[in-house]
Image (tube, grey):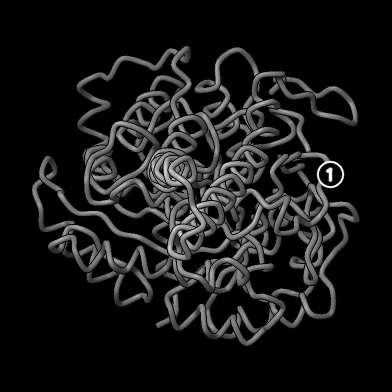
Amino acid sequence: VSTQSTGVKFHHKKKKFLQMWFLLPISWALLLFLLFLVILCVFLVVSTLRGYATVRDQTTLAVAAILVTIFLSLVFYVVPKVVDETFNNIEHDVVLPPLSEDGKALHQSLFVVDMHADTLLWDQRDMLQKNNWGHVDVPRLIEGGVALQAFTIVTQSPHTMSFNENKAPNVFTDLITPLVIASRWNLASLTSLAARTLYQINKLKQAVKNSHSSFFLIETKKDLNKYTTMRNSFPLDKKNITAALIGIEGLHALDDDLDNIDVFYREGVRMMGFAHFFDNSLAGSAHGVTKGGLTTKGIEALRRMENLGIVADVAHASEAVISDISKYGTKPFLSSHTGVQAVCPSPRNLADEHLRMIAKSGGLISITFFRPCMCGTDTFQSIIDSIAYVKKLVGVEHIALGSDFDGFVKTPFDATGFGYLTEGLLKNGFSTMEIQAVMGGNAKKFWETNLPS
């Protein structure tokens, strides 16, 4: 993606554009060809049983059966991993600062929080094992010193994922549906976005259950306080535990039923974004067609969320939605992953006006790690510059981190690399107290205040 604003439009590099454009049609082509082979096999089996098949037909049946097996293997075991490896990787040409002894010691003392990762989409990756692709798993979180990771649930996305304008996807243009099929999610997930949400929540809870007390789910103030006490009891170099918090990216996940807010709350969701890449019946997206504000239903959703203790996330929301949440909301709200327009002009990033709205509410501005939210020749330095800008505009107490790991993005490092950010802040003149705040202290304090009791 280009690193500078080009007026109204944002121009993608050809290679990236072609990757995204062909991903969905190829996925559907594989699935349709597989269906054709299955039908062919059934036809030939029936013909053989009725005595109509010749030797040539039987040979065709054998070949078709072999092809079905090969394509089943490709679709269900190879394709999802290839997609994960292709789109969730490291920007290798970024120069990271060498880690100093002071930086290492400081990083070990931090309570690091990352407010956004889409890891739950990727079934081929065992969250409890260290993988050599993608960005996040529990061992890498622990290695990177991450104390709390927000896992955000994606349920639907247009395959173009334009930052300028997208129509709401249907079953044929949704990027997530082929992934659901290829990864063998449950049948309800084929048509229900709420079912996709619950599937990913259950996946996270199963990982917590199987982690042998190295991975915890945070739902309440009590959970966070208990976990913090436990973590503090470990030596600085042996904090071999980490924790999760659940968020949702876009209220289309409700399937147009506000009662699902209560369902998701009971399942542990504590943060919900109002829109993702397209407008929905509750809110406009910054990348939608109308880019409208909250609808009447959206205002009701906000009230229900605040009453329960679910924090509103304005990442990807239209400017009108951010203004409406500031107007109608009574609780702090946040952006779980964003850049700032003053550092990097992009329709994906927030203007000063909206940064101030978030800060005025007592909320968090979580700086993300990927282009085109970051600009210039050095993505890593752009992250530091964005943090420095927000510090100057609204104060360091409103800054957090929101990597967008595993969200179809390239980042300068994976979950093991947060120490580089600590080092970068040190080298750019941030004080120890400011680094503690940015790297997770602000986020920890926010959740200690805003999680339900």
Q: Nearer the viewer, residue 20 or 140?
A: 20
Q: Is residue 190 visible?
A: yes
> Which one is in front, 71 or 141?
71
Could you say which is closer to the camera, residue 407 or residue 38? Answer: 38
Determine the residue positioned at 25% across, 64% down: 208
> Which residue type carries mark 1?
Glu
Q: How many marks?
A: 1
In the rendered view of the protein, which quadrant contains the C terminus? Answer: bottom left
Residue 434 seen: no
Residue 190 vertical position relative to residue 432 in the rendered view, above or below: below
Instruction: Name the residue tied to disc 1.
Output: 165
Residue in the picture at 43% in, 78% down: 267
Q: Quarter-wise, where is residue 343 in the image?
A: top right
Residue 272 in percent (x, y) is at 59, 66
Say above or below: 15 vs 40: above
Which residue appears at 86% of the width and 55% of the height? 291
Percent coordinates x, y for residue 428 in the rendering: 46, 21
Badge 1, how many Cα within 10 Å: few under 14, some, many 20+? many
Task: Check the image and report above or below for 105 versus 37.
Answer: above
Residue 223, located in which quarter of the rendered image? bottom left
Residue in view at x 37 percent, y 76 percent: 220
Horizontal and vertical percent position of residue 149: 38, 53
Where is residue 245 shown, x and y percent of the image? 40, 63
Classify mark 1: helix, strand or loop: loop
